[in-house]
Amino acid sequence: MRLSLVCLSKPILHGYFRSSCSWRVRIAFALKGIEFDQVPVNLIKDGGQQYSEQYKTLNPMQQVPAVEIDGVTLSQSLAVIQYIDETRPGLRLLPADPQKRAQVRMISDIIASGIQPLQNLYVIQKIGTEKVQWAQHFINRGFQALEPILKQTAGKYCVGDEVSMADICLVPQVYNAERFKVDMDQFPTIKRLNQTLLEIEAFNTTHPSCQPDTPADLQK
Ligand SMILES: N[C@@H](CCC(=O)N[C@@H](CS)C(=O)NCC(=O)O)C(=O)O
């Protein structure tokens, strides 16, 4: 009885409109057609609500996202995305073919381990006045690796012609790159994929500009 009630309740995403990792999870839910509730965690207000004792019980890493789903609380966006993929029907977020699946994980890891953590808010705040140059440097470095890889793996999307977790990671990272004024003309494949993906409903309806916690001046 308890299990069925738990499974019937909507997942709750604790996130922030502008967080690229929260956006990854929003896209995954949208691609699978899963309704979810959002609880905003403002990363700036009150010195950062992610540092509150209450939030720390949800995610001891004091980062968003944290997701309450099926009676468990999960953090780490890629773990959440893979859990959703493994437990929900619909479009596959990781391909069945082992080589393609490895390529999807490779691209996702380059972004989730090799780029985003180096330009994360916590890191940037430690850098001080050089923060924009720092973020640009690490996004450029990661994109310089990603561009030739994507040239090999991409069809319409990052890996072949099926949308996958790699695309879910790419679009929010390009959003961050644009915020830090990285020159995207250096990366024609990334730019082309980003433009194509943003036309998909699951990507554009979950965009940071139209979330429940998006401030009025940033809404589109
Ligand atoms: N590997 C984690 C990274 C989570 C993360 O870095 N979240 C950022 C927002 S995208 C955050 O909460 N930053 C808050 C801070 O740096 O204090 C994931 O994929 O979920």
Image: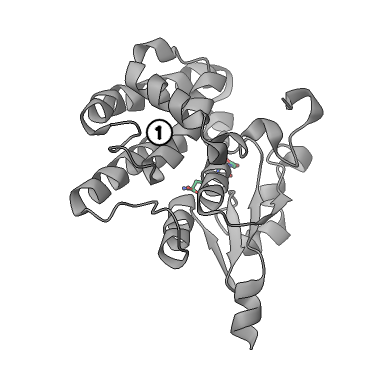
User: 194 or 142, which is in the foreground?
Assistant: 194
Which quadrant does ligand 1 occupy?
Answer: top right
Residue 220, image quadrant: top right
Query: Which amino acid type corresponds to the residue marked 1 in the rendered image?
Result: Ile
Q: Is residue 26 above or below residue 12?
A: above
Give the percent coordinates (x, y) of residue 8: 64, 73
Placement of 105 over or under 129, stated as above or below: below
Looking at the image, which is closer to me, 140 or 62?
140
Task: Give how far across and how far down residue 194 sits, in percent.
Answer: 44, 26
> Residue at position x 30%, y 28% from top?
146
Q: Residue 80 appears at what percent x and percent y?
A: 48, 57
Secondary structure of the residue carrying tag 1 is: loop
Which residue occupies the foreground of this view, 28 or 122?
A: 28
* Residue 138 visible to the viewer: no
| Quarter assignment of residue 153 | top left
- Compared to residue 54, the image places residue 121 above or below, namely above
Is residue 91 rendered to the left or right of residue 58? left
In-front residue for pair 18/1: 1
Check disc 1: other Cα within 10 Å, few if <14, some if 14-19, many if 20+: many
The residue labelled by disc 1 is: 115
Residue 158: x and y in percent read 33, 35
Q: Is residue 72 visible?
A: yes
- Horizontally, is 45 left or right of 175 in the view? right
At 57% across and 72% down in the image, what residue appears?
A: 70
Q: Residue at x 41, y 41 (%)?
A: 112
